[in-house]
Each structure stands twice: as C-alpha cells, then as structure tokens.
Amino acid sequence: MPKFTIDHQSSHAPEEAYRKIKEFLSNDQDIRRFDPKLQCLFNDGSKSAALMGAQFKADMAVAAAGAGSKVSVTVDLPLMLTPFKGKVQETLQRKLAKYLG
C-alpha cells in the first residue's frame, strides 16, 4: 500500500491546532466523500488520531514546533486507489490550510 505524508505548519498552539483538526475530522463531509465508512479514533493525551475506513487508513499527529505547531498526516492508500493520491493530497492540504490558516 503506497504511503504519503503531509506536513502543515501552523501558528496555533498544539492544543488549539489539535482541537481544530479534531473538529475537521469529526464533521467535514469532503473527507468522507473518499470513504463514507471513515471512523476516527482520537487520543487527546498524545494529540493524535487514527483514521480507518474501507478505502484507506491514516494517522495524524500534532506536535509543538517553535511558536506554533506542526500537523503531520500519513495516509496509507491501497494500490487500487493510487491514481487518486493527488486528489486526496490536494483535499487534505486545502482543508488543513482552511482549518489551521
């Protein structure tokens, strides 16, 4: 299964960035278009999440970075969905920018 990672720098503190990402993953419908069965398991203590669906898996983590934070999302796509890798990357980058500025 091909993997790729998206890193996003944010000026928000890690706690605030994690709260915004949690809201995005819980409520945003665009991400569910890729996989309607997507489920998110959040770990508030480590500011991370595991995303599992029928089509793909992903891990998200928020870490302190300077005066802000860094959000890393690692996506694991099945070989059949490799042609959609660009669309998945574009959507995630756009949503991270929208929610984290």
Image: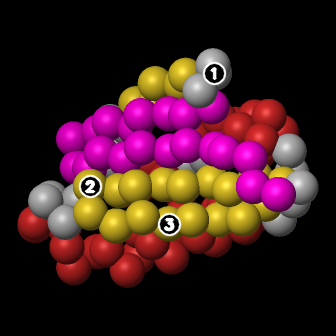
State which region is magenta: 47-66
Q: Amino acid at mark 2?
A: Asp
Residues 12 and 64: in front is 64
Q: Amino acid at mark 3?
A: Ile
Whether residue 24 is visible, yes or no, is no
Find disc 2 in the rendering and name its residue.
76
Residue 3 lies, in percent from the top left, at 26, 63
Residue at point 51%, 76% (across, down) = 90
| Badge 3: residue crowd in 10 Å (few <14, some 14–19, many ≥20) | some
Residue at point 21%, 79% (across, down) = 83
- Tell me the quarter of the image containing the N terminus: bottom left
Label at residue 6? 3
Label 1 sits on a secondary structure element that is loop
Most common secondary structure along the magenta stretch:
strand
Q: Is residue 87 left or right of residue 61?
A: left
Mark 1 → mark 2, Cα distance in angstroms:
22 Å
